[in-house]
């Protein structure tokens, strides 16, 4: 067809090199349904292509996670062709089409103008494929692909930039970042994720306009930062954020860790910033399940946040007295600012609050150790501790100690059945009040220590320690 550049080669997903390597993408189970959507639109007389990140990944020999489709069909025409659709963004030309158990985004070619709030266009009009491409962010995301023939439509040099491992804005970088300031963070994420470089003019525009990141909502910034942190190269992502001047605006508490020196005996790697970066570099190889990955990653960058403001140096060396408490305070401020969910906040703050307790596990009393080992999400606490050690002195003896202890303990050992209840305390003659909680906690502590094991022993303990005083008065 005339709209395909003649110089473009014939491509198939299973054997694409695209000048960017010889790796072969595995076939995605999501692709057949995406191909059917394109085929149905074309049989109805419309243009339709794969677009954006999925094409970029196919050309790199990587299996796409998702497939986005662009078409000349208007939203109402897309909805007329497919039985199951959701017009979530019909005003912007976007319709979701359900095929089987998967939902695919189908967008109409469009132009956008007048981005008054740094994200949403005030004017949207339907357009041609070439015009649609020009509104997109980076050349590597600008490619269109005919899934039936494998041919690539390249209006902006995206194939060359993929081959050259380059992140470059489409057209004027100033205009692209003015349209959506979050694109500055997205450029960093893509460069880190793909191991690409950022084009000189794009990079200079980011540095000039870094301050405009304040126009972006906290939720969008949080999501993009999390994607950097759980990606394949979080260290490089953080370094790029810092070099571009974005980190000091988004996370000044973390930027402040640069140059904060530490005792060489415990931190031969250098300052707190370098320690944090080393932990991030280790994170991809230790990454937990997706739901937990973001929590651990944010705990990594925040766990020593308190060191910048608590550092002291005396004749005995460098100290960070109170840095955990200060770190919890600063982390709470960061998480509130970023509008984290309550559950995420609780887990991340617990990780930061407890990360130094591993130093003392060998000296803990049995009851204290068991309470520590049964902390919610203790596997994440262990992982943070492991990263903390590997990012500094490399000693993992305390991790091994905890794992060994856990192997020898049952669920009942960590959570023994309650020997007495509040009703039992009433039956023993005690008056209800805040003291009940303290008594029940004491009983559990003695259970965890192995000092008592039965209801009778618990009752005897209460009678000895908390028996009510005899009533005043009597015979004289």
Image: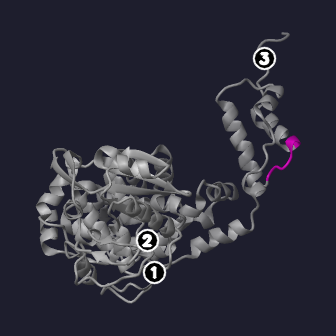
Closer to the chain start, of discs 3 and 1, is 1
Viewer-proximal residue among 453 and 88: 88
Residue 229: % across, % down = 39, 65
User: Toward which corner of the image does residue 196 lie, by quadrant?
Assistant: bottom left
User: Mark 2 — residue?
Assistant: 64
User: Toward which corner of the image does residue 439 lie, by quadrant?
Assistant: top right
User: Mark 1 — residue?
Assistant: 25
Q: Is residue 233 magenta?
A: no
Q: Is residue 110 left or right of residue 229?
A: left
As drawn, 154 above or below 70:
below
Q: Of helix, strand and loop, which one carries label 3?
A: loop
Q: Of helix, strand and loop, which one carries label 1?
A: loop
- Contact, mark 3 vs mark 2 (Cβ under 8 Å): no
Badge nearest the viewer, 3 or 1: 1
Viewer-proximal residue among 225 and 75: 75
Q: Residues within 10 Å of mark 1 (few under 14, many from 20)?
A: many
As drawn, 7 above or below 376:
below
Q: Quadrant of the N terminus?
A: bottom left
Residue 467: % across, % down = 78, 30
Extreme residue toward the top, this view: 476
Q: Residues within 10 Å of mark 2 (few under 14, many from 20)?
A: some
Residue 471 tag number: 3
Closer to the chain start, of discs 3 and 2, is 2
User: Toward which corner of the image does residue 159 lie, by quadrant?
Assistant: bottom left
As drawn, 126 above or below 434:
below
Extreme residue toward the bottom, this view: 22
Query: Spatial distance from mark 3 to mark 1, Cα to Cα?
Result: 83 Å
Q: Of helix, strand and loop, which one carries label 2?
A: loop
The structure residue drawn at horizontal position 27% and vertical position 83%, both measured from the top left corner, is 163
- Contact, mark 2 vs mark 1 (Cβ under 8 Å): yes
Q: Is residue 330 left or right of residue 212?
A: right
Q: Which residues are magenta?
A: 451-456
């Amino acid at each position: 067809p005339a709209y395909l550049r003649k110089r473009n080669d014939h491509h198939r997903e299973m054997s694409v090199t695209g000048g960017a390597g010889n790796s072969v993408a595995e076939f995605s189970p999501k692709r057949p349904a995406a191909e059917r959507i394109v085929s149905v639109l074309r049989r109805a007389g419309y243009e339709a292509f794969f677009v954006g990140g999925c094409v970029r990944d196919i050309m790199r020999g990587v299996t796409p996670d998702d497939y986005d489709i662009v078409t000349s069909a208007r939203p109402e025409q897309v909805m007329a062709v497919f039985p199951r659709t959701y017009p979530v963004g019909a005003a912007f030309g976007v319709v979701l089409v359900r095929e089987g158990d998967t939902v695919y985004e189908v967008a109409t070619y469009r132009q956008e103008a007048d981005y008054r709030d740094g994200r949403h266009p005030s004017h949207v009009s339907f357009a041609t494929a070439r015009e649609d491409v020009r509104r997109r962010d980076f050349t590597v995301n600008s490619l269109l692909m005919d899934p039936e023939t494998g041919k690539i439509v390249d209006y902006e040099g995206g194939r060359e930039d993929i081959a050259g491992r380059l992140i470059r804005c489409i057209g004027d970088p100033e205009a692209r970042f003015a349209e959506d300031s979050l694109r500055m963070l997205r450029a960093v994420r893509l460069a880190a994720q793909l191991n690409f470089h950022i084009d000189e003019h794009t990079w200079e525009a980011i540095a000039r306009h870094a301050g405009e990141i304040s126009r972006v909502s906290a939720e969008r910034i949080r999501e993009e930062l999390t994607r950097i942190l759980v990606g394949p190269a979080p260290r490089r992502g953080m370094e790029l954020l810092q070099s571009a001047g974005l980190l000091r605006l988004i996370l000044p508490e973390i930027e402040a860790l640069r140059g904060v020196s530490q005792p060489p005996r415990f931190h031969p790697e250098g300052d707190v910033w370098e320690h944090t970066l080393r932990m991030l570099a280790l994170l991809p190889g230790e990454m937990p399940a997706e739901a937990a990955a973001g929590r651990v990653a944010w705990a990594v960058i925040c766990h020593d946040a308190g060191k910048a403001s608590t550092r002291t140096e005396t004749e005995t060396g460098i100290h960070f007295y109170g840095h955990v408490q200060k770190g919890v305070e600063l982390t709470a401020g960061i998480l509130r600012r970023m509008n984290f969910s309550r559950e995420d906040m609780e887990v991340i703050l617990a990780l930061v609050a407890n990360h130094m307790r591993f130093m003392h596990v060998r000296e803990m009393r049995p009851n204290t150790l068991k309470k520590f080992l049964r902390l919610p999400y203790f596997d994440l606490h262990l992982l943070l501790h492991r990263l903390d050690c590997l990012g500094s002195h490399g000693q993992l003896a305390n991790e091994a100690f905890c794992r060994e202890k856990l192997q020898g303990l049952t669920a009942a050992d960590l959570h023994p059945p309650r020997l007495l209840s509040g009703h039992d305390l009433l039956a023993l003659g005690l008056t209800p009040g805040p003291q009940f909680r303290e008594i029940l906690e004491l009983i559990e502590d003695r259970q965890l220590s192995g000092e008592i094991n039965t209801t009778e022993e618990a009752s005897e303990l209460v009678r000895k320690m908390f028996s009510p005083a005899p009533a005043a008065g009597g015979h004289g």
